[in-house]
Image (spheres, rainbow, N blue to C red):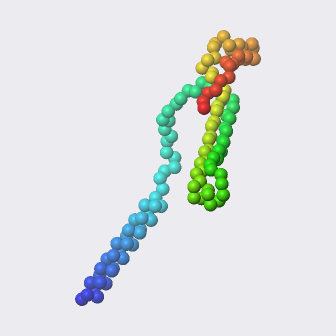
């Protein structure tokens, strides 16, 4: 009787694991449609012409000097990594209508002075 109960319980557990495995395989292999529509969430007018981006990275290490034993027991060291980025260009929102001239097929534009746009 006990062996039948153990056999029945083992078979039930095995059946549950097989069904769980099949459901898991079906769930994993189910593919979502790739051609979903795109959604525009934000439009931002920048009105600028970026002409240069300058990046700088500086590593500074400071600490106590001494022997290896002194540095291990009493030494303090600090490592500072500084990173900066500057974008320069022309702010086109400052362009005035009288700064644009059209002569036949030629267009001349007098751009505003360049400036730092972001840091």
Foreground residue, 114 or 24? 114
Picture coordinates of residue 20 (x, y %)? 38, 68
Picture coordinates of residue 33 (x, y %)? 49, 50
Foreground residue, 114 or 55? 55
Does the rendering let one see residue 49? no
Quadrant holding the N terminus: bottom left
Picture coordinates of residue 64 (x, y %)? 62, 50
Picture coordinates of residue 95 (x, y %)? 63, 17
Does the rendering let one see residue 97? yes
The reply, left or right, for residue 37 in relation to residue 47 is left
Foreground residue, 50 or 97? 50
Q: Is residue 16 above or below residue 4?
A: above
- Residue in the picture at 46% in, 58% down: 30
Q: Residue lying farthest top?
A: 98
- Residue in the picture at 59% in, 54% down: 75
Q: Is residue 9 above or below residue 40?
A: below
Q: Residue lying farthest left?
A: 1
């Amino acid at each position: 009787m006990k062996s039948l109960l153990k056999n029945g319980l083992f078979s039930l557990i095995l059946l549950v694991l097989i069904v769980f495995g099949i459901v898991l395989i079906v769930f994993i292999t189910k593919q979502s449609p790739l051609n979903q529509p795109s959604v525009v969430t934000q439009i931002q007018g920048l009105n600028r012409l970026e002409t240069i981006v300058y990046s700088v990275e500086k590593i500074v290490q400071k600490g106590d000097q001494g022997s290896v034993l002194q540095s291990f027991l009493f030494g303090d060291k600090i490592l500072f990594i500084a990173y900066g980025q500057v974008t320069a260009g022309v702010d086109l929102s400052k362009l005035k209508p009288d700064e644009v001239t059209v002569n036949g097929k030629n267009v001349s534009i007098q751009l505003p002075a360049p400036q730092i746009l972001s840091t």
